[in-house]
Amino acid sequence: MSVYPLTTNIQRFSLDDGPGIRTTLFLKGCPLHCPWCHNPETQSQEVEIYYHEAKCVRCGLCAEVCPEKAITPPGPNGEAPQRDREACSRCMECVKACQYQALTKVGEEMPMEDILREVLSDMPFYKSSGGGVTISGGEPLLFCDFVVELALRLRKEDCHVAVETSGFGKWEDLYRLSEHIDLFLYDVKHIDDSKHKEEIGVPVAPVLDNLRRLSERKTNIRVRIPVIPGFNMDKDCFGKIGDFLLGLDPPPEAVDLLPYHGFAEGKYEQLDRPYKYVGLESLERDDVLELEDILKTKGLSTTVGGTVGVGKR
C-alpha cells in the first residue's frame, strides 16, 4: 500500500543540497536514528509538536485543553509546563489554544498540486543556475511511490531532480527511483557494520550493497560523508571508505565532506529529546582537510560542505 508522507519544510534558495539554486522538500520519516541528525523532526513519520519555551507566557491554557492530561500546568514560580509525549494523542488542541505560538505543529500533509506549485515557482532560478528540486528527509526511500510520482511531474517541466538518501531500504525501491532521478546525494556514514549499527541503529551492509548496485547502473551519484567526532573522524575509517568508493564501477562523481555542526541542538530541546553532542564545538573546514586529503590521494574528487557546479541529466 502506498504511503503518503508528511512534509516538514519546503526550503527555497538552498545551496547545499545539490548543484545550483534549489528548493529542498523535507519528508517526515526515517528508519535511521543518527544522534547528530540535523533534522530530528523528520525521524518520526507522525505529526509532532515543537515547544518554544522562550515564547511561553505560562498561561496554562495548553494544560487546560489537553484531553489526555499530558501537560502539567505551569509551576507557581514560573516553571514551564511539562509534556508527557508518550501520553500525547497528537490531537493538536494545545497547539490551537496557544495564542503565542509557543506550541507549533510539526508535519503537514500537502497535496501534490500544492507541492508542485511551491517548488516550481522558482524555475527561472533553477534554469539560470543549473539547479532544481531536491527531495530529502527523513528518508525518501520510505515513500517510493510518492517520490516517483513527484519526480515524473517535475521532469515533465524539465526540472532537475535530486534525491538525498541514506541508502537504507529495499533495492527494488532504489532501482525504481534510479529510472526517474537525475542525481543521488548518497550518505555513507561509516564502513564498519558493528559501529554503524551501534550508533545509528541499522547495519551498513544494505547501504553499501545498494550503493554498489546503483553505481553499476551508471547513475549520477555524489557521496556525502558527515564528519562526526568520536564516530568516524579518523584516518582509518576514511581510508576504508575511500577504498570502497574506488571499487565502485564507476566511482561516484564526487565526495562531499559535511563537517559536524550543532545548529540543530535547539530542535532537540523543542522536541523534548536528549542531544548527545551538547556543548561540542562545530567543526571548521580546516578540521577535516586531513581526511579530505586521504580521499584526494586515492583519486576521488572532493568538496567540503556541499555540491558545486550545475545539474546534469
Image: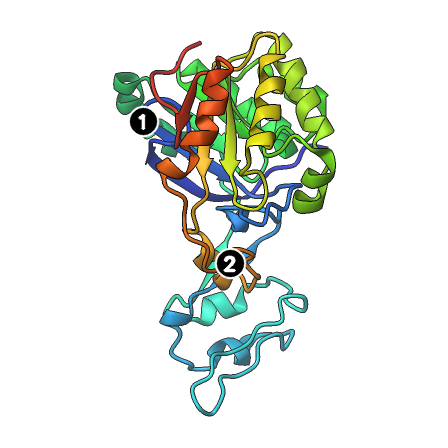
Instruction: Answer with the quarter of the image where residue 53 lies.
Output: bottom left
* Numbered circle sitting on residue 37: none
Residue 177, horizontal then vertical, whole percent:
60, 19
Left of 210 or right of it: where is 185?
left
Instruction: Answer with the quarter of the image where residue 123 lies.
Output: top left
Is residue 53 visible to us here? yes
Residue located beneath label 2 in the image: 268
Residue 174, horizontal then vertical, whole percent:
64, 21
Left of 133 or right of it: where is 273?
right
Which of 202/154 is in front? Answer: 202
Q: Amino acid at mark 2?
A: Tyr
Which of 173/311 is in front? Answer: 311
Give the residue at x 35% y 22%.
Answer: 308
Residue located beneath label 1 in the image: 21
Left of 264 or right of it: where is 14?
left
In which quadrant is the C terminus drawn?
top left
Q: Categorize mark 2 by other alpha carbons within 10 Å: few (<14), some (14-19), many (20+).
A: some
Which of 65/190 is in front? Answer: 190
Q: Which-is-in-front pick, marks 2 and 1?
A: 2
Is residue 254 visible to us here? no
In which quadrant is the N terminus drawn?
top right
Up/down of 117 relative to 155, above or below? below
Up/down of 16 relative to 20, above or below? below
Up/down of 273 relative to 287, above or below? below
The kind of secondary structure element at disc 2 is: helix
Q: How many marks?
A: 2
